[in-house]
Amino acid sequence: MATPQLTPGQPAYGMLSDRTRRRMVERLRQNGVADERVLSAMSEVPRHLFVDQALATRAYDDVSLPIGHGQTISQPFTVARMTEILLNGKAPGKVLEIGTGCGYQTAVLLKTGAEVYSIERLGVILDKARRNLRAAKQVHARLVHGDGHFGLAEAAPFDGIIMTAAARNIPQALVEQLSDGGRMIMPIGEEEQYLWLIEKTAQGLQKSRLDPVKFVPLLAGRS
């Protein structure tokens, strides 16, 4: 196999990332992630491009890492788990992401074939996400600077909604923007947080509490 060539600004760790990414995917498989589309996406997206160069050697560890401004990139298992639950074995369709962050979850969703709309309240973080996604050659998401509580009514309905910050409750605007048969995966809580799956069915909303998690809080407004 040919040795990968560095591009300007790429951390030297990128030369080793293929091997460490394969090990990361193997861990995900061993931990129960079974959707091959998700595993393939995780194997193809270079996570080290979405973290600061000083943290690049930890990019494929199963840990969350700081990305600045009080925000984090979720651990790989959490990204894979939420994506797998959202897809539920079906075609991804149109997905709304609440909390673009560094853009890593966005890139994974794109790699599964989803049509992605993503909202981020912090302009400086959104700019970083745009740069990261360009570096990873994943440029087809629609990125929006806004308050995730209100969703994106002009692009609704969405087949799936994924939230990467913890809300106190389920925002009603997001429920209204979810298509019939759609699924929303989100963390809810403050000190004690859990992932919740919300499904919009003919019988109404079905809510299922899943794994304990730890996310930064979903804040209102934009800056």
Image (tube, rainbow, N blue to C red):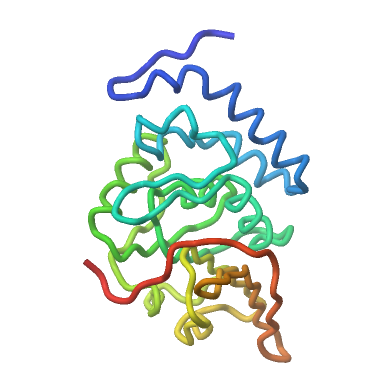
Nearer to the camera, 71 or 142: 71
Residue displayed at 48% across by 75% down: 167
Q: Is residue 131 left or right of residue 206?
A: left
Q: Is residue 26 left or right of residue 8?
A: right
In the image, residue 23 above or below residue 190:
above
Residue 24 on image: x %, y %: 64, 34
Q: Quadrant of the N terminus?
A: top right
In the image, residue 3 above or below residue 168:
above
Residue 29 on image: x %, y %: 75, 41
Residue displayed at 66% across by 29% down: 23
Residue displayed at 53% across by 69% down: 161
Q: Quadrant of the C terminus?
A: bottom left
In the image, residue 54 above or below residue 216:
above
In the image, residue 71 above or below residue 97:
above
Q: Is residue 204 left or right of residue 187?
A: right
Residue displayed at 41% across by 62% down: 99
Residue 156 on image: x %, y %: 46, 76
Residue 26 on image: x %, y %: 72, 34
Quarter-of-image position of residue 143: bottom left
Residue found at the very far front of the displayed protein:
191
